[in-house]
């Protein structure tokens, strides 16, 4: 059933645990699913960027740096993986990617970087669970 697994990462400890769970799941399955780690930078372009600043290059560099620790975790596992870095609304991008590329499972944290600890479920998880066409595994 699981051939392509999408893991949503935001730099939080919850996301680290989600990635770890996804790795364990893949290693326990004989068909060895592939893994994509996706990070969405929730940038909002409101004003004109300052002259001489290449915004796309900056965002790309940021994305590469942000996702580097995930490469370090995934490299030694031997799992077939790729890293997807995008900008926009996180939940929308995650769902669009999962739905359009036919992922079989999304793995993510129950919560993320926000300090609103009274929340049981973060807004990104909430929205992805609502709108994804595939099962969503949330990790505490
Ligand atoms: P909120 O952002 O709603 O104030 P929160 O930060 O605690 O609360 P979420 O943002 O919903 O909670 O995070 C839950 C999980 O969603 C994270 O553990 C991560 O797996 C995923 N996630 C959150 N933000 C992103 C993002 N920008 N890119 C990729 N995955 C994300
Ligand atoms: Mg968040
Ligand atoms: Mg948020």
Image (cartoon, helix red, strand yellow):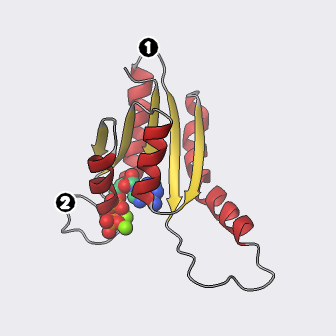
Read off the residue under disc 1: 30
Question: Residue 21 at x, y = what percent?
Answer: 37, 37
Q: In the rendered view, would you say 38 is above or below 53?
A: above
- At 69% from the left and 82% from the top, the residue drawn is 49
Question: Residue 62 at x, y = what percent?
Answer: 64, 64
Identify the image quadrant of residue 18: top left
Disc 2 versus disc 1: distance between alpha carbons? 34 Å
Identify the image quadrant of residue 1: top left
Residue 5 got which mark? Answer: none
Dot 2 crowding, Cα within 10 Å, few <14, some 14–19, many 20+: few
Ligand 1 appears in which quadrant? bottom left
Read off the residue under disc 2: 120
Q: In the rendered view, would you say 54 is above or below 6?
A: below
Going by the image, does 72 lie left or right of 61?
left
- At 59% from the left and 27% from the top, the residue drawn is 78
Dot 1 crowding, Cα within 10 Å, few <14, some 14–19, many 20+: few
Q: Mark 1: which secondary structure?
A: loop
Question: Residue 65 at x, y = what percent?
Answer: 64, 59
List the single residue furthest toward the top.
Answer: 30
Question: Residue 68 at x, y = what percent?
Answer: 62, 52
Identify the image quadrant of residue 28: top left
Going by the image, does 71 lie left or right of 14?
right
Viewer can see residue 75: yes
Q: Mark 2: which secondary structure?
A: loop
Q: Reading the chain from its start, which is encountered first: label 2 or label 1?
A: 1
- At 59% from the left and 44% from the top, the residue drawn is 83
List the single residue furthest toward the right.
Answer: 52
Viewer can see residue 9: no
- At 51% from the left and 35% from the top, the residue drawn is 101
Camera-side residue: 85 or 78? 85
Ligand 1 closer than 8 Å to the CB at disc 1? Answer: no
């Amino acid at each position: 059933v699981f051939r392509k697994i999408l893991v949503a990462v935001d730099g939080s400890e919850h996301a680290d645990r989600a990635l770890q769970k996804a790795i364990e799941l893949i290693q326990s399955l004989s068909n060895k699913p592939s893994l994509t780690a996706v990070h969405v930078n929730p940038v909002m372009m409101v004003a004109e960027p300052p002259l001489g600043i290449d915004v796309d290059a900056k965002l790309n560099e940021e994305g590469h740096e942000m996702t580097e620790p995930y490469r370090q975790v995934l490299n030694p596992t031997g799992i077939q993986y790729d890293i997807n870095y995008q900008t926009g609304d996180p939940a929308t991008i995650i769902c669009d990617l999962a739905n359009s590329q036919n992922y079989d499972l999304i793995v993510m944290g129950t919560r993320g970087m926000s300090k609103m600890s009274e929340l049981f479920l973060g807004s990104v998880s909430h929205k992805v669970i609502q709108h994804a066409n595939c099962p969503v595994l949330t990790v505490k």
